[in-house]
Amino acid sequence: MKKIKYIQIAHDVGVTHSAVSQWFSGKTKPTIDKAFIMKELHNIPLEAWLDIKSYLENDTKKQSCSTTTA
């Protein structure tokens, strides 16, 4: 997954950097319209927003496993 800065996400969906930080820390969740924008712009599935922190952690683990060669 391409790394995206919170400030870019905030700009893309029209919220504050702080709001994005709260989404990714699991304190709050984006509204469905904001999640849909993220799906369209950054290919983050709508379902991921139910627990974005776990989604990102699991995606990172998958990528590190798939890029490791024996």
Image (cartoon, grey):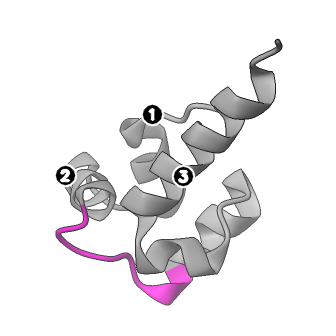
Q: What residue does disc 2 label? A: 18
Q: Report the predominant secondary structure element of the magenta stretch.
A: loop
Label 2 or label 3, whichever lies nearer to me, is: 3
Spot occupied by residue 28 in the image (x, y as percentages of width and height): 22, 74
Closest to the observer, 53 or 12: 53
Spot occupied by residue 20 in the image (x, y as percentages of width and height): 31, 55
Magenta-colored stretch includes residue 68? no
Residue 53 shown left or right of residue 27 in the figure: right
Q: Check disc 1 and report its element: helix, strand or loop.
A: loop
Please tell me whether residue 27 is drawn above or below residue 8 in the rendered image: below
Badge 2 amino acid = Ser
Spot occupied by residue 69 in the image (x, y as percentages of width and height): 82, 14
Q: Check disc 2 and report its element: helix, strand or loop.
A: helix
Q: What residue does disc 3 label? A: 58
Choose top left, top right, bottom left or bottom right for residue 16. Answer: bottom left
Q: Residue at x 30, y 63 (%)?
A: 23
**Which segment did they paint magenta?**
26-33
Please tell me whether residue 4 is drawn above or below residue 46 in the rendered image: above
Outermost residue toward the top? 70
Does residue 1 show up?
Answer: no
Q: What residue does disc 1 label? A: 5
